[in-house]
Image (cartoon, coloured by chain):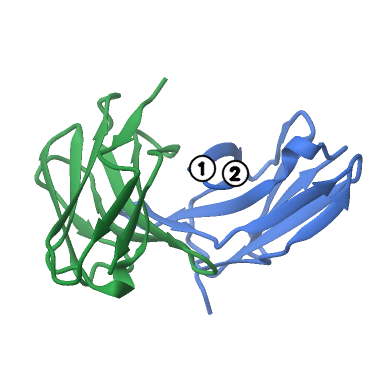
Chain colours: A blue, B green
Amino acid sequence: RKEVEQDPGPFNVPEGATVAFNCTYSNSASQSFFWYRQDCRKEPKLLMSVYSSGNEDGRFTAQLNRASQYISLLIRDSKLSDSATYLCVVISGGYQKVTFGTGTKLQVIP
Amino acid sequence: DVKVTQSSRYLVKRTGEKVFLECVQDMDHENMFWYRQDPGLGLRLIYFSYDVKMKEKGDIPEGYSVSREKKERFSLILESASTNQTSMYLCASSSYNEQFFGPGTRLTVL
C-alpha cells in the first residue's frame, strides 16, 4: 500500500459546483497534513494546512479524520481559476519525513 | 517573499555525463529538499538536508548524491546520468512545515 494515496482524477466539474477530494495515508503516527496546489508546468504551492479541528479558508475547507486515516479538501462555488492539480502532503517521523500524494487533477468547466 | 532558485530551467545531457543541479534559497531556511516529479508517480523525495553538511536519503536516492556546504545552497549530483533520470527536478526549502519550491529543472538525458 502506498504511503499516501489520491484519486488522480480528472474531476471535471461545472463552474459553481462543489467538489471534494480525499487523500488516505498509511502511517497512523503521521503528524502534519497539508494541501498544495500545482498549476500546469508550475511548482507546487501551499494551499492550506489541515488541522484536527478542521480548517476553512474562504471557499476551501480541509479536514482530517485520524480514525480512518484520511484528509479531505472541499471546494465550494468552483471557479475556472481553481483548475489545477491538488497534492496532499503528509509529514511523519522524527526526521519529519515529507510524503506527497500523486495529486488529483481538477478541471472546472464553463 | 521566499525565493528558491534553480540553476537551469531546461537541461539536456548525454548518458554517462556528470550532472550538477544547483538550488539556492534566500530565507535562511534550515531544511532543503530535492524531489523528482514524473507523470503518474507524483513528487518523490530524493534527498533532504536539515543542516549544513548534513544529508538524509529520501525514497529514491539511488544514482544521486547531494552536497550542502552552505546553508543557502543545496546541490543535487547525478554521477553518471542515465535515461531513466529524465525528469522534472524540484528543489524546496522550509523552516517549519511549509515548503517553498523552486521553478524546477526539466532534465533530459539522451
> x, y percentage for residue A61?
75, 40
Query: Are the residues at dot 2 and dot 1 in contact (C-beta closer than 8 Å)?
Result: yes
The residue shown at (41%, 39%) is: B103
Residue B96 versus residue B10: which sits nearer the camera?
A: B10
SS at mark 1?
loop
From this viewpoint, which residue is outermost toward the bottom? A1
Q: Along the horizontal axis of the image, is B30 left or right of A5? A: left
Residue at x 72% of width, y 64% of height: A9
Amino acid type at mark 2: Asp
Residue underneath mark 2 = A39
Q: Is residue B1 left or right of residue A63?
A: left
Q: Which residue is mark 1?
A: A42
Indicate the amino acid at tag 1: Lys
Chain for disc number 1: A
Q: Position of residue B22 (x, y in %)?
A: 21, 43
Residue A71 at least partly seen: no
- Quadrant where the C terminus of chain B is found in the figure: bottom left
Callout 2 crowding tier (Cα within 10 Å): few <14, some 14–19, many ≥20: some
